[in-house]
Amino acid sequence: EYIKELRDISYLENRLENILGIKKVKLVNGAVPAGDLKAEIGRMASQLLQQEIKNGDILAVTGGTTLAQVAAEMTYSAESRDVTVVPGRGGLGEDVEIQANTIAAEIAKKLGGSYHLLHIPDNMAEENIYHITKEPTIKKTLEILKRANILIHGVGTAKDMAGRRGMDEKEINDLLNAGAVGEAFGFYFNSRGEIIYSTTSVGLNLDDLQAINKVIVVAGGENKAEAIISAVSPKYQDILITDEITARKIISLK
Ligand code: G3H
């Protein structure tokens, strides 16, 4: 029975790799209470990170509740490592517990590495962004970020992310009416995978992902199926970690 289950999972993983066109899909068992799903995904992602990270690596991370679970599930490394962790983008309007800065610092501590942060206010006026990127500490973090060779990020539904980050009702409706279904680090995608809105901030642009050696995306829950389809592409990500139930939902939508 156990063997059969494993076979089913690897079959599903393969199907999803083909459908999304990405190199690797890893699935956790989706038959767990909703609250545990993120922890399961977090555990799998943290194990993957701990295996993959080598001395000299620069790891970029985003925020969100799933990434917070990745950080929480990581175990402390026995010795310190020459690894630098940086947030992938500046302020996006999240609560401090799930901001990329907080998660970068926690992951760095667990890995026994160092971190550099981006202390950028949320919703900055476009004209001020240029000036803030010239501030020495911000400039330094951004330079390190440009050399990141691993990125791990989450994906959310456009509706949830817009609401959580304090857009008002009209803005949310406009965004959804424009076709936004998914979100990843401040970029909102329509079902064809086109960016239709981006939160003003600093840090990675989507195009930068192509230069990053390994991009890992973590997102689970059936309600994220459309969002995952919109934000995941072989152009950007290498590895998707999700769950079985979400995988089946994605397959049914494609
Ligand atoms: O950018 C994507 C979202 O941060 C995902 O957030 O992990 O809390 O669903 P979540």
Image (tube, rainbow, N blue to C red):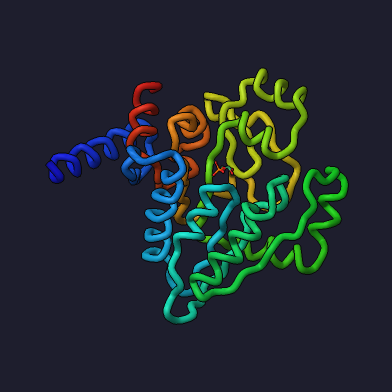
- Which residue is located at x 87 percent, y 49 percent? 128
Decide if residue 113 is on the left or right side of residue 8.
right
Q: In which quarter of the image is residue 135?
A: bottom right
Nearest to the observer: residue 73 or residue 247: 73
**Image quarter hosting the N terminus:** top left
Decide if residue 143 is on the left or right side of residue 155.
right
Across and down, in percent, residue 67 comes to 53, 52
Nearest to the observer: residue 35 or residue 117: 35
**Image quarter hosting the C terminus:** top left
- Which residue is located at x 42 percent, y 44 percent? 37
- Which residue is located at x 63 percent, y 33 percent? 188
Across and down, in percent, residue 118 comes to 71, 60
Q: In which quarter of the image is residue 178?
A: top right
Res 139 visible: yes
Res 240 visible: no
Across and down, in percent, residue 14 comes to 27, 38
Across and down, in percent, residue 237 comes to 46, 45
Q: How many marks?
A: 0
